[in-house]
């Protein structure tokens, strides 16, 4: 049993994130994930019985959610009309088409547990002046932004970069009158050249956004939606602070701090992740139906890159 808590197991689980199936069953009670990367030993571990495990991807994952909901009195049926892959079309781009969502949010509190439940303020206390996706993925994201962002220096436009860092991957020279960054490390935020202001805040402790209603035209979040333990609260706040028809862009890859990502993310695959993020928009309310885009620049040769986006309803 001692081997269950070994660094080698953690690294093998991390590598398995590139595959179609991954299983999450262990929860480490005291060790920050950086300790494992440095090869430190951890003697505290536990097997958590209430940690739900999902196998498969895409429609198979959704079918498992439906089955679990049915066991609690729901109706057993498929909620995805167009999830099966079609030749030449990314399954990520199909998973959110014609979705008949379950009546209730299908995830439970334990689905947002993490291997490392130590305070995020400790984990992010040291600045990391690195990028978390490779250069081709960064270029793909920046190119996407250049196509959907309001033109640079548009009067009255305000942007919010959630879970921000020292770089936001905006197009070169892009500026707006107000670009707010919200993140966990002040040194990183200070160095971000596109920000006009920043706020240090842990959304997992306080998901309330300190802004007036209808404040922002665009909200971005880069490879961090997988760390949110209170996603519905955060997405409700996003909806509140967006202007009518304002755009929210959630981007993600398969790169992550494994022990800080939530269970529902680490035990599922890329297609599932698009469905999960889409569900956050749907169950938060006040958003148009979410859509997914696969902007992976070199499938199989560089980091994948995906977008799930939605707009605030005009009538919300």
Image (cartoon, grey):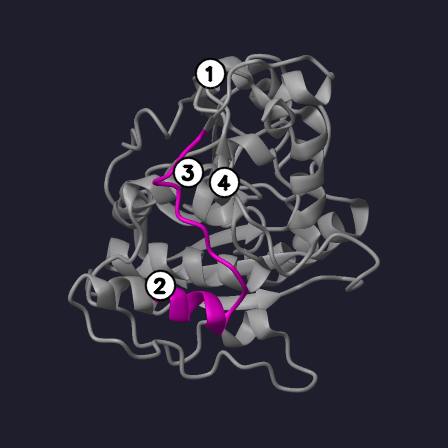
Q: Secondary structure at mark 4?
A: loop
Q: Is residue 243 magenta?
A: no
Residue at x-position 51% and y-position 15%: 44
Q: Secondary structure at mark 2?
A: helix
Q: Give the left or right position of residue 177, taking residue 282 as reference.
A: right
Where is residue 247? Give x, y as percent. 42, 57
Q: Examine the rendering and report whether any part of residue 16 can be seen.
A: yes
Q: In the rendering, which numbered label is found on residue 228?
A: 3
Q: Secondary structure at mark 1?
A: helix
Q: Nearer the viewer, residue 83 or 238?
A: 83
C-beta proximity under 8 Å, tags 2 and 3: no
Q: Is residue 89 above or below residue 206?
A: below
C-alpha gap between disc 3 and disc 1 = 14 Å
* Residue where numbered disc 2 is placed: 65
* Residues drawn in magenta: 47-65
Q: For the C terminus, which image quadrant? A: bottom left
Q: In the rendering, which numbered label is found on residue 121?
A: 1
- Local crowd at mark 1 within 10 Å, few (<14), some, or many (≥20)? few
- Local crowd at mark 2 within 10 Å, few (<14), some, or many (≥20)? some
Q: Specify which label sits upstream in the sequence, 2 or 1.
A: 2
Q: Specify which label sits upstream in the sequence, 2 or 4.
A: 4
Q: Specify which label sits upstream in the sequence, 4 or 3.
A: 4
Q: Examine the rendering and report whether any part of residue 314 can be seen.
A: no
Q: Specify which label sits upstream in the sequence, 2 or 3.
A: 2
C-alpha gap between disc 2 and disc 3 = 20 Å
Mark 1 vs mark 4: in front = 4
Residue at x-position 50% and y-position 61%: 272
Q: Is residue 260 above or below residue 252?
A: above
Q: Specify which label sits upstream in the sequence, 1 or 4.
A: 4
C-alpha gap between disc 2 and disc 4 = 18 Å
């Amino acid at each position: 049993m001692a081997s269950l808590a070994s660094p080698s197991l953690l690294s093998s689980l991390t590598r398995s994130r590139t595959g179609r199936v991954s299983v999450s069953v262990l929860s480490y009670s005291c060790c920050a994930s950086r300790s494992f990367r440095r090869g430190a030993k951890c003697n505290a571990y536990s097997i958590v019985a209430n940690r739900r495990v999902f196998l498969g991807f895409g429609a198979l994952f959704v079918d498992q959610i439906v089955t679990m909901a049915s066991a609690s009195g729901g109706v057993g049926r498929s909620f995805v009309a167009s999830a099966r892959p079609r030749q030449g079309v990314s399954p990520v781009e199909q998973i959110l088409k014609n979705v008949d969502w379950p009546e209730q949010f299908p995830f439970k509190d334990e689905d947002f547990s993490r291997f490392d439940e130590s305070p995020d303020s400790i984990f992010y206390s040291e600045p990391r002046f690195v990028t978390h996706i490779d250069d081709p993925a960064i270029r793909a994201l920046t190119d996407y932004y250049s196509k959907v962002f309001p033109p640079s220096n548009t009067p009255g436009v305000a942007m919010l970069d959630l879970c921000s860092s020292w770089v936001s991957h905006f197009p070169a020279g892009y500026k707006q009158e107000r670009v707010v960054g919200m993140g966990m490390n002040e040194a990183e935020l200070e160095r971000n050249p596109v920000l006009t202001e920043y706020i240090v805040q842990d959304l997992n402790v306080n998901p309330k956004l300190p802004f007036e209603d209808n404040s922002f035209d665009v909200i971005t979040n880069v490879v961090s939606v997988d760390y949110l333990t209170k996603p519905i609260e955060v997405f409700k706040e996003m909806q509140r602070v967006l202007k009518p028809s304002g755009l929210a862009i959630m981007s993600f890859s398969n790169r992550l701090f494994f022990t800080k990502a939530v269970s529902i993310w680490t035990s599922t695959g890329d297609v599932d992740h698009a469905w999960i993020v889409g569900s956050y928009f749907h169950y938060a309310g006040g958003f148009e139906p979410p859509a997914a885009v696969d902007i992976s620049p070199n499938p199989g040769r560089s980091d994948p890159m995906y977008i799930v986006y939605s707009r605030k309803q005009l009538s919300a």
